[in-house]
């Protein structure tokens, strides 16, 4: 890969370990962005609708709390995905060791 190539004098030297670390980082970053773009907006809509339904007497407290719990679990999953992306970025920087 392009990222794993380090310029040394007149030659680019390929670093497979750096390239692999960067590929993992790209994968984790993409997963976090996709999850945030797809899961969180619908989560907000669902929670708003549930609250309005509860306020109108169409949803009982137990179901409202279950929906809210599901929302918290989804947000926790997003945090976990973002954490993995950040950790994988640290791994890239560690492997690069200042070579970039």
Image (cartoon, rainbow, N blue to C red):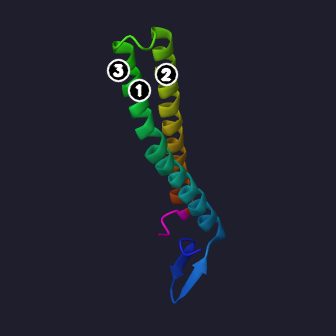
Q: Earlier in the sequence, mark 2 or mark 3?
A: 3
Q: Position of residue 53 (x, y in %)?
A: 39, 18
Find out whether the residues at labels 1 and 3 contact each other: C-beta distance under 8 Å.
no
* In the rendered image, the vertical position of residue 42 relative to residue 10, given as above or below: above
Q: Where is mark 3, residue-wise? A: 52
Where is residue 86 shown, x and y percent of the image?
49, 48
Looking at the rendered image, the quarter that the N terminus falls into is bottom right
Left or right: residue 3 compared with residue 40: right
> From which residue to which does the magenta span run?
96-100
Secondary element under disc 1, as helix, strand or loop, is helix
Point 39% across, 14% down: residue = 54
Name the spot of residue 51 as percent of width and height, x first: 37, 20
**Relative image position of residue 61 (x, y in whole percent):** 45, 9
Q: Residue at x 41, y 26 (%)?
A: 47
Q: Which residue is mark 1?
A: 47
Could you tell me which secondary element the residue under label 2 belongs to? helix
Which of the pair 100/40 is nearer the observer? 40
Cα gap from disc 2 to disc 3, whole angstroms? 13 Å
Q: Secondary structure at mark 3?
A: helix
> Looking at the image, is 95 positioned above or below residue 42?
below
Identify the mark nearer the N-term, 1 or 3.
1
How many numbered tags mark residues here?
3
Q: Who's the residue at 55% across and 45% down the image?
A: 84
- Image marks 1 and 2: residues in contact by CB distance under 8 Å: yes
Residue matched to label 2: 67
Q: Circles 2 and 3: CB distance less than 8 Å?
A: no
User: Which-is-in-front pick, marks 2 and 3?
Assistant: 3
In depth, the one of 91 and 23 nearer the eye is 23
**Label 1 – label 2 distance at C-alpha:** 7 Å
């Amino acid at each position: 890969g392009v990222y794993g190539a380090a310029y040394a004098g007149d030659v680019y030297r390929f670093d497979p370990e750096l390239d692999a670390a960067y590929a993992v980082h790209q994968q984790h970053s993409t997963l976090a962005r996709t999850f945030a773009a797809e899961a969180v907006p619908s989560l907000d809509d669902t929670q708003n609708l549930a609250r309005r339904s509860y306020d109108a007497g169409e949803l009982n407290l137990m179901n409202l709390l279950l929906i809210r719990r599901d929302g918290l679990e989804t947000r926790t999953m997003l945090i976990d995905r973002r954490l993995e992306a950040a950790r994988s970025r640290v791994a890239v920087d560690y492997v690069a060791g200042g070579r970039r």
